[in-house]
Amino acid sequence: MITNRWGENLKKIAPLLIGLGAISYGIPGSLFELANHQGVTSGILLVMTFLISCVIFNLVGIVVPRHQRHAHSHRQAWIVMLSGTSMAFTNTFYIMALQYISVAVAAVMMMQSVWLSIVLAAIADRVWPSLMQLLSVLVVLAGTVMAAGLLPLDGHVSLFGMGLAFLAALAYAVTIQFTGGAASDLHPLTKARLMSIGALVLVAAIWGPTIAPSANWGLALKWGAITSFFVMVFPLTSFSYFMPYLPMGIGPILSSLELPASVIFAFILLRQTVTPLQMVGVAIIITTVIVTNWLQVRHRQQQSWLK
């Protein structure tokens, strides 16, 4: 009885925590820009961010019961660590994209993770997307053209930068899939710890060679500690703990909060301008995501009632 009641309580607070995790994921773009302005290069910032995150997860892992601190097999451990590389790819492509496009445009491209999640889920479950899902993809793409500032088509937005941001969105969609489904029998903190190890190894391999001997390690440590919370510690913990408690279709709705968070913090922290046309595009994307997924959830509920 106590276990069932605890599970029901987790289901109630899961949407809130997942939503806060998505909002948290929308903040680092602005923090990366601020750190760069103070002379902290992308390479050392990412390495410090993931190193600090890995240390924190390993220290916090002490509170996990001894019999739940490790994966059930070496194969499972490798799979979870490999899944953690998706977070490393997300931030790698994202921080590279910021060299060519604004945080607002990068955030809009990251929004593509919503429909990419639909595609990945369809491939994993071997079920074709519904007509509603396909229509929603087309509308989201139309909203993206507006929200990314591609209109009018005068070439002022870097297509290469948008391509990098799209790859970040793809990696983010993979992260959502893994945190919700892979190794669901593992303790959430154990899962997060293994994912952080995989992410750190990849980031160190990619960005380690770019770190100059004269790098400002003091500033890198300071900004790495701040960004680690928003990039890894909080969102990965909330996703690992609460994503399995969400009904199917709710995850993509909540993950869409990353977009307005990115735009808002870019406006507050970086004073980046957002045009009315971009705001309309953002509104179209968010509305489409919410309506589409709400209809899917309602349809599943009706089916369950009929059964």
Image: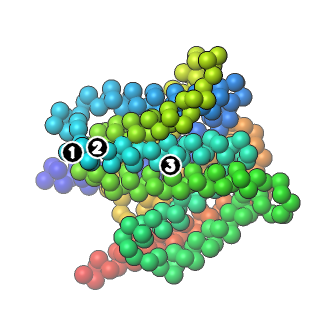
Q: Position of residue 299 (x, y in %)?
A: 40, 78
Distance between the Cα atoms at labels 1 and 3?
Answer: 31 Å
Residue 298 visible, this orientation:
no
CA neighbours of label 2 inside 10 A, class few (<14), some (14 to 19), many (20+): many
Mark seen at residue 77: 2
Q: Position of residue 64 (x, y in %)?
A: 23, 34
Element at badge 2?
A: helix
Q: Position of residue 33 (x, y in %)?
A: 68, 35
Q: Nearer the viewer, residue 33 or 81?
A: 81
Identify the mark nearer the N-term, 2 or 3.
Answer: 3
User: Which of the 4 quarters of the picture holds residue 138?
Assistant: bottom right
Mark seen at residue 22: 3
Q: Are marks 1 and 3 in contact (CB under 8 Å)?
A: no
Q: Which residue reaches farthest left?
A: 1
Q: Amino acid at mark 1?
A: Ser
Residue pointed to by mark 1: 73
Element at badge 1?
A: loop
Placement of 63 over or under 173, stated as above or below: above
